Image (tube, helix red, strand yellow):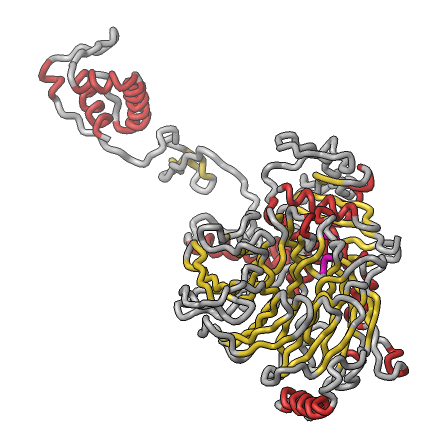
Amino acid sequence: MAEVEETLKRIQGQKGVQGIIIVNSEGIPIKTTLDYPSTVQYAGLIQQLVMMARSTVREIDPQNDLTFLRVRSKKNEIMIAPDKDYFLIVIQNPSD
Amino acid sequence: MPPPNNNVAAIGRKGSVVQKAPGAKPTKAANKKKDEEEGVDGGDGWDDWTHGKALIKPQDQLELTETELKEEITRILTANNPHAPQNIVRYSFKERSFKSTSVVDQMAVHFVLEGSLLHQDSDEARRLRAKEGLSEGTKTHSEPDEEKPETPEAGEEDRPDSAASKTDKKEPKITNQFNFSERASQTLNNPLRERSCQTEPPPRNVFSATASQENSDMKCSYCLIPSSLKMGKLSKKSTILERMVNQNTFDDVAQDFKYFEDGSDEFRDKEGTLLPLWKFHYDKAKRLSVTALCWNKKYQDLFAVGMGSYDFSKQGRGMLVFYSLKKSAFPEYTYPTPSGVLCLDIHEQHSYLVAVGFYDGCVAVYNLQEEGLEPVYKSTAKTGKHTDPVWQVCWQNDDLDSNHNFYSVSSDGRVVSWTLVKNELVFTDIIRLSVNGAVSEGPEDAQQPSIASGTSFDFHKQIDYLFLVGTEEGKIHKCSKTYSSQFLETYVAHSMAVDAVKWNHFHPKVFISCSSDWTVKIWDHTINTPMFTFDLNAAVGDVAWSPYSSTVFAAVTTDGTVHVFDLDINKYEAICQQLAVGKKKTKLTHIEFNPIHPIIIVGDDRGYVTSLKLSPNLRKKPKAKKGQELPKGPEVEVAKMEKLLSLLREPEQSTV
């Protein structure tokens, strides 16, 4: 458990990382380094995106499943690690 | 109905008024009435009638004698109308007299009802039908009641059919002409519209949770990690996320590593360059220097770094650190050690087993798959640990009992084989080095056996028993595992301690050695003198053959330079000499080639490990034919060079 905390701390300390959010399966953020309104916004939007991505993957092949999702945009990159119990979201702008 | 009959008889007996035949009907009616009344007096009357014979006499009853009572009176039922006159007389003008009508109409009409039914074939019905244009089988079809029951049923059957057919043909309803009124109105029905709205569920706070240690970075006043969160899974995902973040941060480095090929090599006339890639450093190993490097053969992005100190006076703790190229910011595994690590080796097949040699003479084996920071095996004073620093360890093939085993060499002059038997480390002295020759076990030797210190060794790739040991005196001994008392050969190699000795990966006869006497020498083990000697102007810390070519090797010196040689291209000079570290006083201590990628890692005495990419000129394959020719090609080359050098043998110190 401490390992995970340390890992998250290191991620937070990396260059350009804007925030980390852990969201539980109901869409409620349980850990975040961003401010509350942004967190809730990210959590809600990303949950929908992940569900859509997962359903896409599974429709193409029902044996398959989504493991990671990386959304690269002009300003930053959102990395999402979904699981059946939670989501891990990291927002990074590496060119900072 | 027995009671009325009985009643009649009884009443007869009772002597009630007996009327004559014409009056039978009314009498009967009266009797019936009485009877009914009596019967109606509850079921009790019935009981009374069967049991008791309480006779009630009316007051005006005619008194008769017994004989008169028993007299049988016959009564006849006729169909005559009692009200009909019996003697109707009519005047007949023809006969001019009154005549009595013989037959009088006896019919008594009780009830008359005019019906509204018309026979279907009657004129009026036909007229009606024509008027209304009704088809057959409708209600106007008059059916006398006495008709057969089938026809009404048929009629009924027809009717539903006709009703159905009616609806099909959409004929008008049959309505009563007189008092049927169809007046209907349709109210305006407003169309129904469903309006609903979905509300967003409000975020809920989970308060039944375990609080974790928060630092100021994490704003978590409203959130706690629930104890149900599976941290095990989270750790896997979080490590991968960390790698992703690292990849983003060092994106340019990763791209260079994968794709960059220095284009200017074409113009550089056979020289090459080294492109710096990632730099690895661990905060907790600040004042330690890199004392050992080893790549993992199975996962070629993982390498091990042993940290300790070469300085005699600055001995303290050490570290065993594992890095992955995918995550340069932080090590994958770290193991603190009580004493400085001086050497390490990762098993080729079981890449989770790492053998480590320490400054205090111990050897240990770590299992990366196990939790915990302690080694799984460790040698102690009782189990034959060395009495001097262990300079080199090397895994061997599994022995006959398929136990893992490794060798170690130390300054105490012993080459020891360690076998991992179940839970312990069993040691066997293989050879004891001495200044004059190998020392045998017994006290037979008259000469004072002065123990030589072994500082490096290497095992032959193909010949299992053959190995080389470099000593502090500068000699290299060629030994066999099976001969513990004798060296096969001794080479007087260097004037100072032999820091590294390495067999060539391809050529079975060639090995290289380096020393703090500034030289790097290449040997053929059958010949007593070196074939090539290179002077690098500074103490050479380490030398390594490249895994892709038999003529390419690299050396690092204490002035922070990496020298790359390719004997195929240039026999006398390095094709690349480049400073690998920023700060001037940094000494490079070790170098290793990656098994598959064209990169090298160099460790320095400040605890940094730098990875460098070899430019194309440094990676030239021998121009011999493909396939099997590869080992033969260099051999031919080396033999060729040998001949060349034999001419140059007298001036031993060759050119730079």
Image-based side of B116 in relation to A80, left or right:
left
Residue B130 showing in the rendered view? no
Kindly identify the residue that appears in the image at 75 percent across and 79 percent down: B653
Q: Give the range drawn in magenta.
A: B326-331
Q: Where is residue A16 in the image (x, y as percent from the top left)?
A: 84, 50
Query: Image quarter for residue B168?
Result: bottom right
Q: Main secondary structure of the magenta part?
A: loop
Q: Position of residue B648 (x, y in %)?
A: 74, 89
Kindly identify the residue that appears in the image at 63 percent across and 72 percent down: B501
Against A3, is B220 above or below? above
Kindly identify the residue that appears in the image at 81 percent across and 67 percent down: B561
Is residue B330 part of the magenta span, yes or no?
Answer: yes
Please tell me which residue lies in front, B205 or B147. Answer: B205
Q: Where is residue B104 in the image (x, y as percent from the top left)?
A: 38, 37
Image-based side of B491 in relation to A94, left or right:
left
How many numbered dots are placed on residues in this image?
0
Against B11, is B340 above or below? below
Q: Where is residue B215 in the image (x, y as percent from the top left)?
A: 74, 35
Residue closest to the far top: B59
Residue B340 showing in the rendered view? yes
